[in-house]
Amino acid sequence: MPADTAADPLVVFTPSGKRGHFPVGTPVLTAARQLGVDLDSVCGGRGICSKCQITPAYGDFAKHGVHVAADALSDWNSVEDRYDRIRGLPKGRRLGCQACVQGDVVIDVPSESQVHRQVVRKAASDRTIVMDPATHLYYVEVAEPDMHEPTGDFERLGFALRDQWGVDRVTAPLPVLRRLQPALRKGGWAVTVALHKGHRDEAHRILDIWPGFYEGRIYGLAIDLGSTTIAAHLTDLRNGTVKASAGVMNPQIRFGEDLMSRVSYAMMNPGGDIEMTRVVREAIDALAVELATEAQIDARDIMEVVFVCNPVMHHLLLGIDPVELGQAPFALATSNSLSLDATELDLTALNPAARVFILPCIAGHVGADAAAVALAEAPEMSEDLVLIVDVGTNAEILLGNTTRVLACSSPTGPAFEGAQISAGQRAAPGAIERVEIDPVTKEPRFRVIGSDLWSDAPGFDAATATTGITGICGSGIIEAVAEMRMAGLVDAKGLIGSAEQTGSPRMVAEGRTHSYLLHDASPTGGPRILVTQGDIRAIQLAKSALYAGARLLMDEMGVDHVDRVTLAGAFGAHISPRHAMVLGMIPDAPLDKVTSAGNAAGTGARIALCSVAARTAIEATVRKITKVETAIAPRFQEHFVNANAIPHATDPFPYLAGIVSLPDVSFNQGGGNDGGRRRRGR
Amino acid sequence: MPADTAADPLVVFTPSGKRGHFPVGTPVLTAARQLGVDLDSVCGGRGICSKCQITPAYGDFAKHGVHVAADALSDWNSVEDRYDRIRGLPKGRRLGCQACVQGDVVIDVPSESQVHRQVVRKAASDRTIVMDPATHLYYVEVAEPDMHEPTGDFERLGFALRDQWGVDRVTAPLPVLRRLQPALRKGGWAVTVALHKGHRDEAHRILDIWPGFYEGRIYGLAIDLGSTTIAAHLTDLRNGTVKASAGVMNPQIRFGEDLMSRVSYAMMNPGGDIEMTRVVREAIDALAVELATEAQIDARDIMEVVFVCNPVMHHLLLGIDPVELGQAPFALATSNSLSLDATELDLTALNPAARVFILPCIAGHVGADAAAVALAEAPEMSEDLVLIVDVGTNAEILLGNTTRVLACSSPTGPAFEGAQISAGQRAAPGAIERVEIDPVTKEPRFRVIGSDLWSDAPGFDAATATTGITGICGSGIIEAVAEMRMAGLVDAKGLIGSAEQTGSPRMVAEGRTHSYLLHDASPTGGPRILVTQGDIRAIQLAKSALYAGARLLMDEMGVDHVDRVTLAGAFGAHISPRHAMVLGMIPDAPLDKVTSAGNAAGTGARIALCSVAARTAIEATVRKITKVETAIAPRFQEHFVNANAIPHATDPFPYLAGIVSLPDVSFNQGGGNDGGRRRRGR
């Protein structure tokens, strides 16, 4: 605490407003630390790291009741001079460890000098996530060995970390220990260490060591390991900046498109789980290298990885046979968060001592990815009742507010991701992602990933010449089906009408069913893109599962409407809320209350990467979440069957009805035989 | 605590004498636990493990004030009957978890039912070491998964360990986690785990897991990793029994005989340390397999390894370049004890999750082997001042009592181990290990390892026919030099007399010096075994270093005599105290106060393997030991020079003088020229 003698100069820090009286000669950094002002320092006030830059303000500050004289701080000194000469100090800046208090002064701490910068701010919650990563760089000066008081170099490093940084209980893996003695001697008994704060009661661990003051940066990976896609963000661990992002297909896809087919593969093929573990680990390692290359950093500077994933991906990542997850009671091998060495997962491209943190699983079907969504979206802090839907091959659904949070998962299958769709493909350049169908002419127009132009705009052909038009992705098929329903090409049961019934020459008969020709084969060899009856059925199954899961949680909560809906997931970000509502994917809600949260699981992974407090918080939240098992709930089947209609048949949808009026058409299978298009009274 | 209602039956346990009143129907095991009586149980009182066998006593027990009626315990029950039928229960025994208190009773706990059996009792100290190993087997019954309250199987195992065994904070490496789900299901939701108690604040760790109740045993290795020899004891971790012992040469010998030549090798050859690390780890792995084979166990049942070793061996084992240990200030990379995975040391023959504990080093020249000697000999508990000398290539010397303990090491070189001796060899069958020289005839007789017969006994030739007589080992050369001195063949300066000077035809002229023919070449091809002037010089250097180290500690302690001397080390066990005193290896002391402690470092390793309390205790002791650095002490050089004479020239040796009178001879180099043997007055 500051001495706070009124006779001593007053020091006011902005933007925090923290203030106190300090004796003349007190370094600004010291005053900041005593007041708990967030002013960074890596070198511990030795004028090496320049992280403690501050901007003194001069003049009258009525607000603070202070007049700051020109000599309120000690003169610019040789350390600052040298730093300015070599690296440059922005105009008006001083080094907080060098500038000393001489009189009343107002000091601004610029955001880049704050350690605990906000990295993720969620508008939906009151929370802000501040930088508080598990791994920090510390510069330490270590006592030299003394023959008369023999102690190991490592033990003296431990004393120095304790005395200079207040860090206790430090360990180091053998390869780091091996490099300790040369580093200390090369650095003149000073080293910089990358120190990893152990999770919960684990000891601190030195992950890397450099002689003297290390100028470099350290990084972390936030990885959303999905059944279909592995997405990773390479993040600067000092400030949370994302340096590079990339995604690759999960190579396990060749063992099965969806989760259950991978579990089956493991059950039917002895060693199959080991094979799937190997390929996913290899893919992650390669992805780390790709990101490091893109960001032009050394992959060895990646010190940490945070994983979020569903339970089957979780077990396969860990090398645990997921067979129990394929059958009731869906027992997880382990549900708590995990803190591991990256080498335990055969991740060898990273720093050899890199650590891995895996978020906790909520239940056998509701994984660490759902926990990450909960971390990012914080339903437990929401005053209004929010439904959060993370759409993927398996949909994770959260429903809650400050009183209670429920979770379940629903087996939507891969249709929403473009699989099981005749012209389906993953979201990549060339894929149709937006669709509109004129309700009068029944003619479509669409947009393709890689171009902002609609297909009827001038220049579209040129804009898509390089990618071509290769298929339709998840968001595209949802819009196509919803637009077909709105245009009267599909009835409430999901049947596609014939050319005769609909009056559209785009309807193509295929056996007893019909398809809609969205795009004809290009002269350049691109495929014909149809929406088939099978596609509609696949989407109906997927959306029914999704809706039934949400409805089950609403039953459990005892409500029949929700205040707002958040669409999460990389895919969720691309879904049009209006089309999702037309399809009946989600419960009826005001359109402006249906929002996209982007890749919330990925955001949750980034939050956990940047904040150890968030790791602890999500563990507590997960324990409090009520888990609802869809597989054994009879009402789930009931909701599922009732949700088959487009939109669903069970609940009223006044909000949707206020936006669109859906044509009251009905088509028989086989088409044409029931007299074509007819109107029915409600 | 027991209810202790005087109306309830009285239960008295022997041999502890613990007693209390317990309600009728209380199982004996429950009563024992409540009283803190040491009664074993692996299955937690489920009648499976039979570890809680007790023997009730009947009749009048005046000493305890109890009459025990024949029905003092409940009837023999079906669980006991089944156990007796299948495995046999010794007569008079009951299972403590089945037999219930019905009336006043006296219960004897046989030693094999005590968990905390004494494993090592040191006569020299008040301490007894009781079994308290880091790794225990626990049988646990785990709750089945519940879809409505989803938790991981591992988390439920953790709850079970907490509730049934009071063990908290449990982790498991991934390969064990992988085996958890099948084991739980195969064992009907009961498993046996090998649980390793983490050192200090480490979490508990599950090293292995078996379905149901595991009948097998688990083992540990206590390894004394010497510069010359690696000695290991395979120990049953339930009771401390040594199942097999073996030693192999340290393969690093090919990089240098002694420690400093290995440090030099590392300095001169980039990567040389890595090579030495590799070969020693391979040798240890092979030794583990050899021991397991000998004991007819699976090496995978070895759960723990405890290492003691000198600092250079310590660093090379850990993969740390020992170069700093070769030069002042002899800084250790790390001095504290270490708790590691065996795989970190590339030990792959053991259980994949096996743990390693390495005792702390005392100083840059005084290693974990010296700490182990301190653990075994406990100088800090000795009322009288004890000098403990662990003789090896490097001698570790401890001096202390309850007030203070000092430690140093002294570079004796490998002469005491038979190296640098013309006919030297390591202690193996065929090596001369005992020598006597008749003071009148100057004729020798000797004993050879592998036979109990002296060389002048009938049948000696036949007894040694298979081994031959191949050389002279460390204890043999010490006796030979001391005997030569006593027989007047060597003078106080260490010069060997000529045939003329000594009157013995066994003196062989070699240039300007002489040798003593201990054993002529055998007709069967065995070598001629001579004690040369060079051999005497090598022994003089070694013993001077040893004596100077001891003397330096005595200076530091401010004493000029010690109360007793303990010769430690595998080699120390074979040294004749009388000959050591004649040679002047050790300070003068009453002959009956010079004793051998056998391989004290190895004993210390075994103690640490069997007792986690001992691990903590030796860490505390090591911190309190005063380290004395011989390399920089000017008085060490002084003592070294003065100790060259046989015995030494500095201190009086009244105790030795009371036993032997040493011929007052003096020989010039070159022999014969100074008139042969002459007497000098004192």
Image (tube, coloured by chain):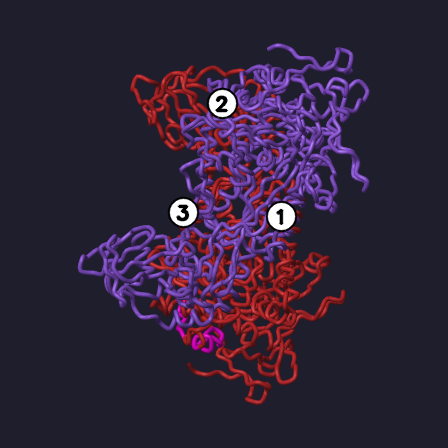
Chain colours: A purple, B red
Check whether the beta carbons of the residues at disc 3 and disc 2 lie within 8 A of each other: no
Question: Which label sits on residue B127?
Answer: 3
Q: Nearer the viewer, residue A444 or A228?
A: A444
Hey, which quadrant is residue B319 in on the image? bottom right
Q: CA distance from mark 1 to mark 2?
A: 54 Å
Sequence order check: which comes first, mark 3 or mark 2? 2
Q: Which is more foreground, mark 3 or mark 1? A: 1
Q: Nearer the viewer, residue B2 or B64?
A: B2
Disc 2 is attached to a residue of which chain?
A: B
- Labels 3 and 1 within one chain: no
Please provide the residue range marked out in magenta. B638-657
Check whether the beta carbons of the residues at disc 1 and disc 2 lie within 8 A of each other: no
* Within-10-Å neighbours for mark 1: few <14, some 14–19, many 20+: many
Magenta span contains residue B646 = yes
- Name the residue that disc number 1 marks: A347
Check whether the beta carbons of the residues at disc 3 and disc 1 lie within 8 A of each other: no
Q: Amino acid at mark 2?
A: Arg
Quadrant of the image containing the C terminus of chain A: top right
Q: Nearer the viewer, residue B176 or A25?
A: A25
Q: CA distance from mark 3 to mark 2?
A: 32 Å
- Name the residue that disc number 2 marks: B94
Find numbered disc 2 in the image and state the secondary structure of the residue it sits on. Answer: strand
Measuring from the top left, give residue A51's x and y in whole percent.
Answer: 42, 60
Find numbered disc 3 in the image and state the secondary structure of the residue it sits on. Answer: loop
Disc 1 is attached to a residue of which chain?
A: A
Q: Amino acid at mark 3?
A: Arg
Q: Amino acid at mark 1?
A: Leu
At a point 56% along the width and 30% down the height, the residue shown is A577
Residue B131 higher or lower than B2, as above or below:
below
Question: Which label sits on residue B516?
Answer: none
Residue A651 higher or lower than B224, as above or below:
above
